[in-house]
Image: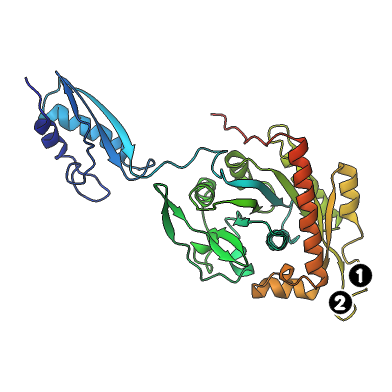
Amino acid sequence: MTLYPKLILDALATVRYPGNGKNLVEAEMVADNLRIDGMKVSFSLIFEKPTDPFMKSMLKAAEAAIHTYVSPEVEVSIATESRQAARPEPGKMLPRVKNVIAVSSGKGGVGKSTVAANLAIALSKLGYKVGLLDADIFGPSVPKMFQVEDARPYGENVEGRDLIVPVEKYGIKLLSIGFFVDPRTATLWRGGMASNALKQLVGDAAWGELDYFILDTPPGTSDIHLTLLQTLSITGAVIVSTPQQVALADARKGVDMYTNEKVNVPILGLVENMAWFTPAELPENRYYLFGKEGCKQLAEELGVPLLGQIPLVQSICESGDKGTPVALDEQSVTGRAFLQLAAAVVRQVDKRNLEQAPTRIVEVKK
């Protein structure tokens, strides 16, 4: 039996691609590299994305069609190509980002997202290019804090890949799962779905060139933290706590997660949020509602820097709710505190990069 290209293409034309209902030839999925050598046939099938869900079934169906309609004696070799470039592998997803900072807390309610948002703005005010990823998949708050709840990021083709373009506000590049889900309903996802969504926000977005990429992580220790550690080379972690003993106990757990020997992410320092209450009409007064300098004592005990103490004032809550983070006002008490925090983070990052090797991602053991 003599094989020729039309025989093979006629057989492939019997296979329909479920994504669009067209056959492989009609959908232009058969590459022009068809080779025939006696009873050996080789060619490539072209898919839109390297992660196409029908890829394996199409390879089997194409081989079966040739055996059925041409001859079961044919040796078939099928390679795959994709029109869209593959997502970079973990650890290499953000080649133009200099520093990745995880803002973390052992428990909820300590103002971690407020610190992350205002730290991002303060770093931008110091002249750095900054991105902020809302990694709290189940409780996203960045859209509200930046007053961009109605924003819908669009896609753009960059170097052969369809990428999400982050929303920009106050000079910060922002992404959050909150842009893609209904804010009025709970996000009921299993851990795997949440982790995949997070990988897309990191690896399938056009973050571009950044000096600082801030991760607003969920409270506690979870699947999301592990996904971030397996996906990104994190420069260092900033741990947020209040002076309360119960919060400090959880902050210790946050520190332990990053310093675990399998993780080895340097702790840049602690931030004491709600360090004291200052009434707007009495800016010199300090009332220690949650205890005094508990975070400072913990920092000394752990041998890490206290990066800053952020006072609790009425305006910080109101500013967050209105979508105008308090760090925008450099003249306010809290605005100045966040600028000082940003400067301290920069110093610690520079020191860390000078003295330590880049962080390795956590390897996934099969």
Q: Secondary structure at mark 1?
A: loop
Q: Residue at x 76, y 60 (%)?
A: 110
User: Where in the figure is residue 67, as x and y percent of width and height?
Assistant: 15, 27
Q: Residue furthest left?
A: 1
Q: Are marks 2 and 1 in contact (CB under 8 Å)?
A: yes
User: Where in the figure is residue 167, as x and y percent of width and height?
Assistant: 53, 63
The amino acid sitting under disc 2 is Pro
User: Where in the figure is residue 264, as x and y percent of width and height?
Assistant: 72, 36
Question: What crowding class fits label 1: few (fewer than 14 Cα within 10 Å), some (14-19), or many (20 or more)?
Answer: some
Q: Residue at x 73, y 70 (%)?
A: 326
Q: Which mark is residue 58?
A: none
**Image vertical order of residue 327 relative to residue 297, above or below:** below
Q: Residue furthest front?
A: 127
Q: Mark 2 = which residue?
A: 279
Spatial CA distance of label 2 from label 1 is 9 Å
Q: Residue furthest bottom?
A: 281
**Image vertical order of residue 96 relative to residue 42, above or below:** below
In the image shown, does 260 or 8 lie closer to the viewer?
8
In the image shown, does 196 or 90 lie closer to the viewer?
90
Q: Earlier in the sequence, mark 2 or mark 1?
A: 2
Residue 278 in view, yes or no: yes
As drawn, is 360 to the left or to the right of 27? right
Residue 256 in view, yes or no: no
Q: Quadrant of the N terminus?
A: top left
Q: Which mark is residue 287?
A: 1
Q: Residue at x 56, y 70 (%)?
A: 148
Question: What crowding class fits label 2: few (fewer than 14 Cα within 10 Å), some (14-19), or many (20 or more)?
Answer: some
Q: Residue at x 13, y 34 (%)?
A: 11
Q: Secondary structure at mark 2?
A: loop
The amino acid sitting under disc 1 is Tyr
